[in-house]
Amino acid sequence: MNSLNNPFEVLLHQMSELKKIALDIRDLPKVDYTTKYYTRKEVAQICRCSIQTVDNYIEYGFIDAEEFGIKGKLIHHYQIFNKDNSLKSFKKKKG
């Protein structure tokens, strides 16, 4: 009977729950990407391409890879992601 008196009570309750969830998400700790590095294989999986394509991107200068060890190449997070964490586009422009 209470819902008949105030038909918006359910909506107000749901809105308060959504507000709590949004505040919880906002208060999550931020991930520090300044020290995040990926292997060529991980970059290939993220970009949905082959390791050879990643090697080509490195060779063409689209991605700067840092040498680690004898054969190791690591790629910094911001070489493949923009500052807003969207994936960069490495496709060649025709023309």
Image: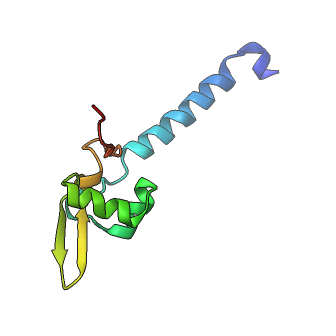
Where does the N terminus fall, quadrant-wise? top right
Q: Does residue 95 sit above or below 68 in this rendering?
A: above
Residue 48 image position (x, y, % from top left): 46, 55
Res 23 → quadrant? top left
Residue 32 seen by the camera: no
Res 86 → quadrant? top left
- Of the pair 24 and 66, the residue shown nearer to us: 66
Where does the C terminus fall, quadrant-wise? top left
- Of the pair 23 and 38, the residue shown nearer to us: 38
Task: Classify residue 47 as left or right of residue 57.
Answer: right
Q: Does residue 1 sit above or below 95 in this rendering?
A: above
- Of the pair 53 and 10, the residue shown nearer to us: 53
Q: Residue at x 18, y 84 (%)?
A: 69
Task: Classify residue 49 as left or right of residue 68.
Answer: right
- Of the pair 87 and 20, the residue shown nearer to us: 87
Residue 45 seen by the camera: yes
Residue 35 image position (x, y, % from top left): 21, 64
Residue extending farthest to the bottom is 70
Residue extending farthest to the right is 1
Res 94 → quadrant? top left
Residue 20 image position (x, y, % from top left): 49, 39
Coloring scheme of the render? rainbow
Task: Classify residue 55 as left or right of residue 6.
Answer: left
Q: Does residue 53 sit above or below 25 in this rendering?
A: below
Q: Does residue 56 sit above or below 8 in this rendering?
A: below
Residue extending farthest to the front is 95
Q: Residue at x 23, y 60 (%)?
A: 58
Q: Residue at x 77, y 22 (%)?
A: 2
Count of residue discs? 0
Q: Residue at x 29, y 49 (%)?
A: 81
